[in-house]
Amino acid sequence: MPYDVDHIRADFPIFERMVGDRPLVYLDSANTSQKPRSVVETIEDHYLHHNANVARAMHMLGAEATEAFEGARAKVARFVGAQRSEEIVFTKNASEALNLLAYTATRELGPGDEIVISVMEHHSNIVPWQLAAERTGATLRWFDVTSDGRLDVERAAEDGLINERTKIVSIAYVSNVLGTVNPVDAIAAQAHAYGATVIVDASQAVPQLPVDVAALGVDYLAFTGHKMLGPTGIGVLWGRYELLENLPPFLGGGEMIETVKMTGSTFAPPPHRFEAGTPPIVQAVGLGAAVDYLSELGMSAVARHEQEITGYALDVLQQIPGLAVLGPRELVSRGGAVSFTLATPAGEQIHPHDVGQLLDSRGVAVRGGHHCAKPLHDAFGIQSSTRASFYLYTTTTEIDALAEALTYTVDFFGRRR
């Protein structure tokens, strides 16, 4: 069936909202996506009719809750091409998934070993590795970025960034600021040639691209539910089962054990070894409903729409005087987040918070700041930027509204000063 954005938007009640006398234009999906009615109703139904804890309950509600929870795990596994559902660990977000690995996968690291990340990472894929390096004595190294917002792979090759000392490489699949789609498969092949472990932060990729973990050739992959139509409070860590089997627990408590004695404990196999305590049950069920919705649309169709709407936005935005796009200005290896700076005709920079507030007054929701990627902004010599991000429900009419609001903003601040 043809991709019908208007039909899709009818599934999202929030788009009926008005901001004053203007329709809501939501362009902040890289931060969190809106939710279709089916996801919200699935969560409501679970709480109203199937609410119980999972695992050992011997009653009907417990069995239903466990079936729904584990059924969601199986859906997520199929969605990303996992070999088995036990390769899916539920966390509360992608940050927890990355912290889990930074704690457990570094236990044998020591001085002389190296961890490789990049300047374009979200703080969630920087800070855990800084802490791991401090804890183990390993050295943290990183890919720089080119002026057009790509990983500087040529300089990395010249510097021997990935080498025999490299033990872990952790890279974003898609930049949450620049929209850059990184060559993670090629980086994984290079890292594996030296026996390194490869981790991918796919928080911006899984919502908008078909992702097959086997085809990527990586070892672990983390993403979050709330950016892919699901609820907040649910993240996913995928790992090759034989690797998960050899990781120690991250958190201790109920449900992650095999047996407990006062003299010591043994631990459950993956994934339950990493899911201490009551898990995010209804959040996982909601994520399963989001996976159903995305699967019905087809991720190839979602990716095509993302490309089309991003291409339209790049064309329109670059016609606005004083607007400078950060990162790739063409669609090659690019996702649906466009960050930019804005200046008056006199060349004075307009602070992104001012841009965001003025746009909000005209019904347009964007994000202003460093987007949890301060080192990347430092690399471009700026403090912050404005980001418009799109998703499967974004229309060209909304892009036009953004452009009109930005033009108004430039004129407003130009007259003020």
Image (tube, helix red, strand yellow):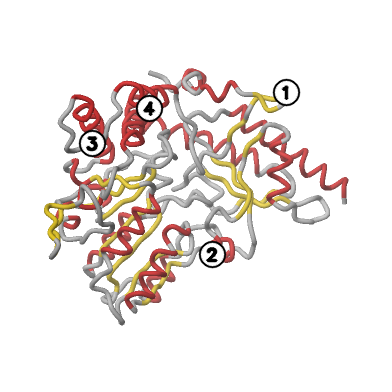
- The residue indicated by pointer 1 is 21
Q: Is residue 181 visible?
A: yes
The first of marks 2 and 1 along the sequence is 1
The first of marks 3 and 2 along the sequence is 3
Q: Are marks 4 and 3 in contact (CB under 8 Å)?
A: no
The first of marks 1 and 3 along the sequence is 1
Query: Which mark is on residue 406?
Result: none
Q: Are marks 1 and 3 in contact (CB under 8 Å)?
A: no
Q: Is residue 254 left or right of residue 14?
A: left
Q: Residue at x 33, y 77 (%)?
A: 138
Expressed as whole percent of the image width and height from the top left, the position of residue 140 reads 39, 73
Q: Are marks 2 and 1 in contact (CB under 8 Å)?
A: no
- The residue indicated by pointer 4 is 43
- The residue indicated by pointer 2 is 375
- Quarter holding residue 360: top right
Expressed as whole percent of the image width and height from the top left, the position of residue 94 reads 38, 50
Q: Nearer the viewer, mark 3 or mark 2?
A: 3
Q: Are marks 2 and 4 in contact (CB under 8 Å)?
A: no
- The residue indicated by pointer 3 is 54
**Residue kind at label 4, given as amino acid type:** Ile
